[in-house]
């Protein structure tokens, strides 16, 4: 076992015999969910997937040996970012089908509690639909969580919240703490926003329209990453970790934890 980190169960790092031996201790499977999407000049395409995975690993360490981390889903629903080269987007149907079959496979091996750890807001509506499908078709009680939304009070203290930010202070701060190799610290930029065409519209509402990111910002950024810091990132992540672990202990049969 690699002793550079606290003990944790991660599917990709185990053999089937190791998993079989540990399975009686595992009460919850985490499925990190991200995207392969532009983050302006501020961070790399893997930012969402890496952030989701690193946060899930911290949950697994905190709740060891009761948690297993499944392989990260690196693709999400990102059609609104497709005007920026390199972005990869799935249809909502493909996205939900892949995740449904991941859970269906693991459920066949005896696991019945699942938490999707999401780091890409574009996935949220589809995740809501997926939860209902998993409950109705497989008789499971899954849940999904947004990292930044869990610590919105700490995130707001640093600037804009996740719903109104992309590759800005809060997201880049989390990456500086969780995965500093993803951040281009020498190129951090603020947003270059365009004037909104319609009144009372924005990605978080109250009126929603179909938009693409190049209609909102010329450089792919919403928010100001120049004020990002690992210290703010640690505060956001620690608060989110405390809260998700509290939720897990109640929602997924607290006596097991």
Image (cartoon, rainbow, N blue to C red):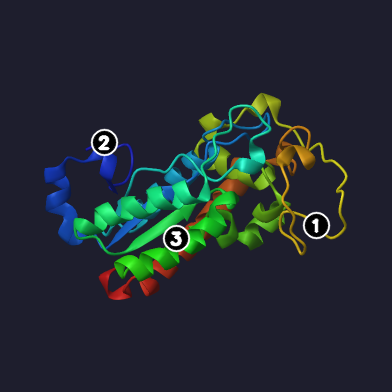
Pointer 2 residue: 2
- Identify the image quadrant of the N terminus: top left
Pointer 3 residue: 130
> Which mark is in front, 1 or 2?
1
Q: Residue placed at 16% from the left, 53% from the top?
A: 22
Q: Residue 127: x percent and y percent?
A: 49, 58
- Label drawn at residue 201: 1
Mark 3 and mark 2 residues within 8 Å of each other at the beta carbon? no
Mark 3 and mark 1 residues within 8 Å of each other at the beta carbon? no
Can residue 145 be seen at all in this image of the molecule?
yes
The disc, 3 or 1, on the residue closer to the chain's N-terminal end is: 3
Q: Residues within 10 Å of mark 1 (few under 14, many from 20)?
A: some
Residue found at the far top of this picture: 186
Task: Name the one closer to the observer, 41 or 185.
Answer: 41
- Label drawn at residue 244: none
Q: Residue 16: x percent and y percent?
A: 15, 43
- Identify the image quadrant of the C terminus: bottom left
Can residue 65 be seen at all in this image of the molecule?
no
The disc, 1 or 2, on the residue closer to the chain's N-terminal end is: 2
Q: Residues within 10 Å of mark 2 (few under 14, many from 20)?
A: few
Q: Residue 120: x percent and y percent?
A: 56, 48
The quadrant where residue 106 appears: bottom left
């Amino acid at each position: 076992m690699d002793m550079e980190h606290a003990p944790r169960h991660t599917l990709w790092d185990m053999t089937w015999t190791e998993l079989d031996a540990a399975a009686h201790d595992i009460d919850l499977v985490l499925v990190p969910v991200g995207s392969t999407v532009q983050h302006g000049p501020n961070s790399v395409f893997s930012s969402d997937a890496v952030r989701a995975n690193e946060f899930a690993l911290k949950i697994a360490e905190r709740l060891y040996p009761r948690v297993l981390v499944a392989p990260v889903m690196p693709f999400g629903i990102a059609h609104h970012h497709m005007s920026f080269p390199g972005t990869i987007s799935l249809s909502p149907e493909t996205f939900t089908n892949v995740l449904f079959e991941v859970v269906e496979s693991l459920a066949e091996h005896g696991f019945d509690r699942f938490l999707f750890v999401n780091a890409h807001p574009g996935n949220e509506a589809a995740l809501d639909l997926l939860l209902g499908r998993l409950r109705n078709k497989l008789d499971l009680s899954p849940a999904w969580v947004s990292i930044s939304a869990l610590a919105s009070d700490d995130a707001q203290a640093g600037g804009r919240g996740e719903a109104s930010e992309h590759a800005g202070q809060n997201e880049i701060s989390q990456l500086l703490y969780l995965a500093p190799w993803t951040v281009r610290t020498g190129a951090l930029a603020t947003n270059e926003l365009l004037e909104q065409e319609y009144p009372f519209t924005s990605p978080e509402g109250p009126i929603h329209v179909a938009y693409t990111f190049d209609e909102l910002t010329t450089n792919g950024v919403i928010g100001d990453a120049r004020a990002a810091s690992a210290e703010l990132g640690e505060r956001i992540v620690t608060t989110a970790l405390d809260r998700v672990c509290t939720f897990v202990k109640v929602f997924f049969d607290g006596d097991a934890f």
